[in-house]
Amino acid sequence: MENPGGELFSEERSADVVIASMDGTPDPRVREVLGSLVRHLHAFVKDVELTEEEWNAAIAFLTATGHKSDDLRQEFVLLSDVLGVSMLVETVNHRAGGVGTESTVLGPFHVVESPPRPLGADIALTDGGEPCLVTGRVVGPDGEPVGGATVDVWQADADGFYDVQRPDEVPRTNLRGLFTTEPDGTFWFRTIMPRYYPIPDDGPVGTLLAATGRHPNRPAHIHFIVQAAGYAPVTTHVFAADSPYLESDAVFGVKPSLVREFAVVEDPERAASLGLPDRFRTVDFEVVLFRSAEG
């Protein structure tokens, strides 16, 4: 195809020439996104005067990132996370406006389908860790209860590992569960206190973090995906207020509205009724959903 703009490639007009070659793109959104990408990418190359060696190193880095990815680990998601892109995409697409529960990153470990469990189930399938009771309620923007909502949860263990990181040591669905809320919107389950942990840093992303003097750690948290008919789903976390790294999360996922105190409970009668030891931790997390455009 002839160059639609009639201009040959030059340093000054590089982006314009490439973007003009895409004028025949049938999908207007694809044309818009690719055009903006080209313009910003060319501006970046000119801004830093990228050398050929540096560009080759970048290609090698991205190639290694692809090679490190498999069914249980997505290194590109991890790269997006540590560059703040995952968090930015979440924020742009789920502007809460001070009403709904704020969203945060999905993370690289939602790779196992959470098994449906009855309310009150213990999702910790192995011994170890500080017992914890999680309670909550799903409501709409006007405070109306949302019964029948699904609450998908997953978390790291007391050593800071997810089940998929220890496939030979723990059951594949350890510390995962899919719950359905009561008619009044309530849900509850038993688990253990999550622990802060390092994201996988034995691959290209770890090399990037080391090169920039950054640590790989995330503060302690429990993941949630909450969905209900007529409402927009939300992917979020609840963070433990006493965890380190709240101010320097490696993936920039912490929002003040998602930080909670995990209170210590010492009440033998209540503990016995819940099937928990006398001393346990507890947190309550209300999730406010927006109505969907179709709802």
Image (cartoon, rainbow, N blue to C red):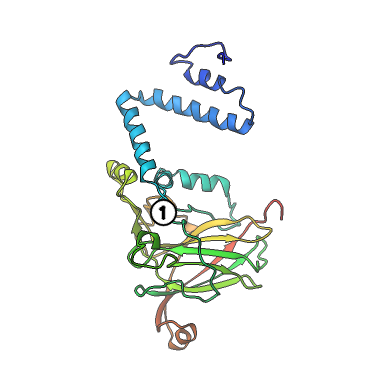
Residue at 56%, 11% in the rendered image? 6
Quadrant location, the N terminus: top right
Residue at 37%, 37% in the rendered image? 63
**Rendered position, 83 above or below 34:** below
Residue at 45%, 14% in the rendered image? 10
Quadrant location, the C terminus: bottom right
* Farthest-out residue, bottom: 269
Give the image quarter of residue 265: bottom left
Q: Residues within 10 Å of mark 1 (few under 14, many from 20)?
A: few
Q: Position of residue 282 (x, y in %)?
A: 45, 74
Of 159 and 117, the residue lying toward us: 117
Q: Which residue is mark 1?
A: 72
Of 28 and 195, the residue lying toward us: 28
**Rendered position, 25 above or below 188:** above
Q: How many marks?
A: 1
Q: In the image, 131: left or right of 5?
A: left
Q: Position of residue 244 (x, y in %)?
A: 34, 60
**Rendered position, 243 above or below 64:** below
Q: Position of residue 247 (x, y in %)?
A: 38, 54
Q: In the image, 145: left or right of 264?
A: right
Residue at 64%, 61% in the rendered image? 228
Of 237 and 240, the residue lying toward us: 237
Give the image quarter of residue 229: bottom right
Q: Name the amino acid type tagged 1.
A: Leu
* Tag 1 secondary structure: loop
Q: Position of residue 100 (x, y in %)?
A: 60, 57
